[in-house]
Image (spheres, rainbow, N blue to C red):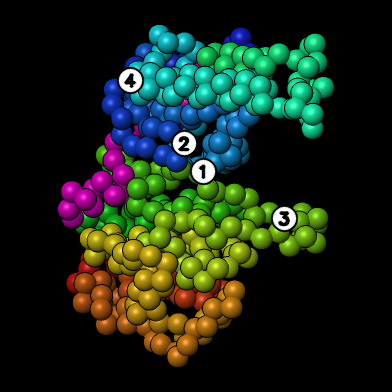
Amino acid sequence: MNVHLPAAGHTSSLSCYRRIEQIGEGTYGQVYKALDLRTSTPVALKKIRIHNETQGLPATAIREIKILKALRHHNMVELLEIITSKGREDMDEDDEREDDKRKRQAKESKEAAASRQNTQTDGSGNLSQASQGADLHPDDAPKRVSKHLKSTGNLFLVLSYAPHDLTGLLDLAYKFQPVQIKYIFHQLLKVLDYIHEKSYIHRDIKCSNILVMNDFTIKLADFGLARSVKTNAWERDQQRPLTNKVITLWYRPPELLMGSTNYTSSIDMWSAGCILAELIIGRPILPGKSDAEQLSFIFDLVGNRGMKGGSGFVLGKARDSSLRDRFGSRMAEDAVTLTEKLLEPEPTRRYGAGHAMQVSLESKTR
């Protein structure tokens, strides 16, 4: 299906959809279950708040749109179209509150600009020449901003809908059967292999971003932190660092916690290893509350033997993995081995998605 981007004078609006309920909240807006009134198809609407004329769209929203247009896979959420809310008739209670906030901010901006004009003087106490200009009125800029804010609604990403996510199912204490775990995890490896082959990394693999259909088909979602790692010659020369402020703490690999800004798709594979263990055990295996505690949990579980320090971080005494001792009685042998390979503390020795797919998980756990 083609993605229909908004164009001046020709775009769908929110009136083509009926919002049913809020099902989540992202970094830049709510996510709703909705019904496409033209086809009676359930969809997910991801709201993108447009705060003002200067800030424009959030960078994470622009990045997600570009990546969802560039990548297509059966196990990725699909971007169907992008729509706008054009007027008050499209608003719900959340939109009304945001509209009031925009108006208040516009009013405050107008008052602040007027105050600056009134107080701007030269050394003699007179208004400066710039503020006396015949073509400059104190209200001009605020009026332009206010007019823009009043006429700007929200953008919505229309995405394929899935009724569940892994976090929701685990929170309900759903007991995944071994064959279901094998099927879900194989799909995750397939989509990660596809993304990594296309030179992208997701950078936020976690259970809540893995949507689940009723037949246990998964859809990887939320590409707001994803980015391309395909570098050109200029970027290689500049050695541009990557941010290490990515991936939810419980799924964040040790190299990021130690400050690395030069990493690869192996960070996604660490997160995948955490998810495999969580599916089998039924709870997060590394639930730290701070970076320091998370790193301590990691080294207690998988050790640090063979790992290289980073960003001045001192590893201290070499420690061996205790993962097999702690979870071996609850996981089949192949599952333990694969988890160990994915939770390898040294990223250069961590299994990639293609390699991990070659491992056949046993059909039952102990």
Highlighted magenta segment, given as a residue range: 153-175
Lateral position of residue 74 relative to residue 148, left or right: left
Query: Which residue sits furthest bottom?
Result: 317
Of the residues tagged 3 and 1, which is closer to the observer? 1
Name the residue tied to disc 3: 231
Of the residues tagged 2 and 1, which is closer to the observer? 2
Numbered badge on residue 28: 2
Of the residues tagged 3 and 2, which is closer to the observer? 2
Secondary structure under tag 2 reads loop
Name the residue tied to disc 1: 224
Secondary structure under tag 3 reads loop
Instruction: Give the spatial CA distance, label 3 vs label 2.
Output: 28 Å
Q: Which of the two residues, 153 or 194, is positioned nearer the viewer here?
A: 153
Of the residues tagged 4 and 3, which is closer to the observer? 4
Numbered badge on residue 93: 4
Q: Reading the chain from its start, which is encountered first: label 1 or label 4?
A: 4
Crowding near pointer 1: few (<14 within 10 Å), some, many (20+)?
A: many
Q: Does residue 346 sit above or below 109 in this rendering? A: below
Give how far across and how far down residue 146 sits, in percent. 57, 16
Q: Reading the chain from its start, which is encountered first: label 2 or label 1?
A: 2
Q: Amino acid at mark 1?
A: Gly
Instruction: Give the spatial CA distance, label 3 vs label 1.
Output: 20 Å
Crowding near pointer 3: few (<14 within 10 Å), some, many (20+)?
A: few
Q: Does residue 137 sit above or below 350 in this rendering? A: above
